Image: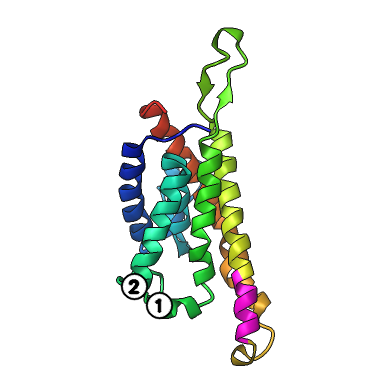
Amino acid sequence: MTRVSRPYILMWTIVGLFLTIGANFLPAYVTSSPWQWFSEGVTAYPIGFKCQVGAVLLVSCLGGRTTGVLTQVIYLLLGLLWLKIFNDGGGIEYLQKPAFGYLLAFIPGSWVCGQLAFRRFSSPDAATRNTPLAPSLEYLGVSCLCGLLTIHAIGIIYLIGFQLINWQELGGFKLLDLIVTYSIHPFLGQIVLACTAALIAFVVRKIMFY
C-alpha cells in the first residue's frame, strides 16, 4: 500500500468535495456509437441519474482511501447540518429517506476503492524488483467496481432497515421496489461511470507521476 502525502490528501479532498457536490447536479449521459459520429454527429442521451457516484470513485482513485473517506464525511455533514446539496435537498430529516443509505455508503465505498487503487505491485524484472509499479487501468477499473458494489451492498442493507421501520407507512412489502429504484435500475449506467472514473484517474496519475 502506497501512502499519499498530506498535501495530496488536502488537495484532493478540496477538489473531491467540489466534484461530489457539483456532480450531484450534473446528469449523466451516454453518446451514440463512435462509428455514427462522422455520419450522424455526436448525440448525447440522458440515462436518468446524476454523475455523483463517478465523482466519488474518481476522488478515491486519485487521492486514496483517506481522501475519499474525508471528502464524503465532510459532504454528509454539510448536507445534514447546513446546505441543501443532496438530490432532494438536505437537513437532518434526510436520514429518514431511503436514498440516504446510498449516501452513507459513499464512506465505506470510498475506503474500499481508495485502498485498492493505491495498492502497489512489485516489478517482475529482477533489476527493478524493488520498484513499485503503479496500478494498471484494468486494476483501477476493478477498484472502482469494488467501491461501487460496496455502495450498493450497504445501500440495500439500509433499505432493509428502512423497510422494517416504515412497514405500515409504506403499505406493506415495498423493499423490492426500493431496490429496483435505487440499485438495479441505475447499476449498469453507474458501471459506465466507474469505468470512466478509472480511465480519468489512470491518465491523471500518469501525468502526475504517481
Residue located beneath label 2 in the image? 81
- Residue 54 location (% of width, % of height): 46, 52
- Residue 69 location (% of width, % of height): 45, 52
Q: Are marks 2 and 1 in contact (CB under 8 Å)?
A: yes
Taking the image as shown, residue 50 lies to the left or right of residue 190, namely: left
- Residue 165 location (% of width, % of height): 61, 84
The colour scheme used to paint the residues is rainbow
SS for callout 1? helix
Does 164 appear in magenta? yes
In which quadrant of the rendered view does residue 155 lie? bottom right
User: Of residues 93 and 141, which is closer to you in this image?
Assistant: 93
Residue located beneath label 1 in the image? 92
Q: Residues within 10 Å of mark 2 (few under 14, many from 20)?
A: few
Q: Main secondary structure of the magenta part?
A: helix
Does 67 appear in magenta? no
What's the amino acid at mark 2? Leu
User: Of residues 13 and 87, which is closer to you in this image?
Assistant: 13
What's the amino acid at mark 1? Ile
- Residue 20 location (% of width, % of height): 38, 56
